[in-house]
Image (cartoon, grey):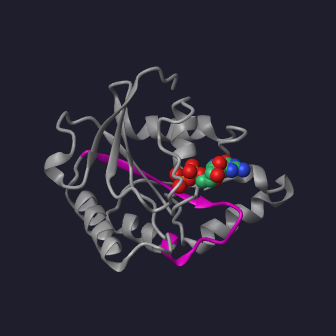
């Protein structure tokens, strides 16, 4: 998609704060620092609309970006940042569970993992959670520019295996530096929202 019109519509914690216009939503998840803000900015051709976090783990709201009046990207705060208190973790989990359990506008989830490493336990828990809600899933392996091409197959199978992906789950390697995979991610989003 050629994106011209984007606004950060709403930062929400509770359902009564979510947008009310009924547009389809694509939800983005991943651990802190995985490259989620960079991916959002790459998709919408902006340098820094989505906030690249100088303090990882700080944002604890769902951020709804309204894209071209056709879809919302729902940016879920990153997980796995060590310095977050137990109480914040619980709040985070409650916010995410409430969103997935109630939100009918969700059409699919884009889940980011670092393509350079095996998925973490928390990555796997996030995927289990998405499977539980039976939502269409695109896993994106980020920072692929840092992996030599000869190892891309290995990176893919490491992700598939580590996350126990099913045949229905799609996997796309991605780089916000080279924009590799951008079209494929957009194709998936359009297929599930339009
Ligand atoms: P977030 O916390 O998930 O939103 O991650 P950010 O988008 O803020 O990125 C975290 C760090 O990884 C930043 O230093 C980015 O410049 C870097 N980064 C993000 N995406 C890529 C990528 O595709 N390739 C490389 N080499 N670095 C990336």
Q: Residue at x 86, y 57 (%)?
A: 150
Is-magenta flag for residue 109? yes
Q: Quadrant of the C terminus?
A: top left
Q: Quadrant of residue 71?
A: top left
Q: From what the image shows, is residue 146 above or below residue 155?
A: above
Q: Which residues are magenta?
A: 105-123
Find residue 10 and report its image quarter.
Answer: top left
Viewed as shown, does residue 143 lie left or right of 31?
right
Query: Can the viewer see residue 180 in this picture?
Result: yes
Measuring from the top left, give residue 37's x and y in whole percent. 52, 46
* Number of marks in the rendered image: 0
Q: Position of residue 8 (x, y in %)?
A: 35, 35
Q: Front-most of 52 and 74? A: 52
Percent of width and height locating residue 77: 41, 57
- Seen in the picture, residue 31 relative to 173 is either above or below; the reply is below
In the foreground, 139 or 83: 83
Relative to 94, 162 lies left or right: right
Q: Position of residue 127 (x, y in %)?
A: 45, 67
Relative to 110, 10 lies left or right: left
In screen coordinates, is 55 left or right of 95? right
Q: Residue at x 41, y 22 (%)?
A: 5
The reply to whether residue 171 is in sight is no
* Snapshot quadrant of residue 95: bottom left
Please say whether residue 159 is one of the residues in the magenta stretch.
no
As displayed, is residue 68 above or below residue 144? above
């Amino acid at each position: 998609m050629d994106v011209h019109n984007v606004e950060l519509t709403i930062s929400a914690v509770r359902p009564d704060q979510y947008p009310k216009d009924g547009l389809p939503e694509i939800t983005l998840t991943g651990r802190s620092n995985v490259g989620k803000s960079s991916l959002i900015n790459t998709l919408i051709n902006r340098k820094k609309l989505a906030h690249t976090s100088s303090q990882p783990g700080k944002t604890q709201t769902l951020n709804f970006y309204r894209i071209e009046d056709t879809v919302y990207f729902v940016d879920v705060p990153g997980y796995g940042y060590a310095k977050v208190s137990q109480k914040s973790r619980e709040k985070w989990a409650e916010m995410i569970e409430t969103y997935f359990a109630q939100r009918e506008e969700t059409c699919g989830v884009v889940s980011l993992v670092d393509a350079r490493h095996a998925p973490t336990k928390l990555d796997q828990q996030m995927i289990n959670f998405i499977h539980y809600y039976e939502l269409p899933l695109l896993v994106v392996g980020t920072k692929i520019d840092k992996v030599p091409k000869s190892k891309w197959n290995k990176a893919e199978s490491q992700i598939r295996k580590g996350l126990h992906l099913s045949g229905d789950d799609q996997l796309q390697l991605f780089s916000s530096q080279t924009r590799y995979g951008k079209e494929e991610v957009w194709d998936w989003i359009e297929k599930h929202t339009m």
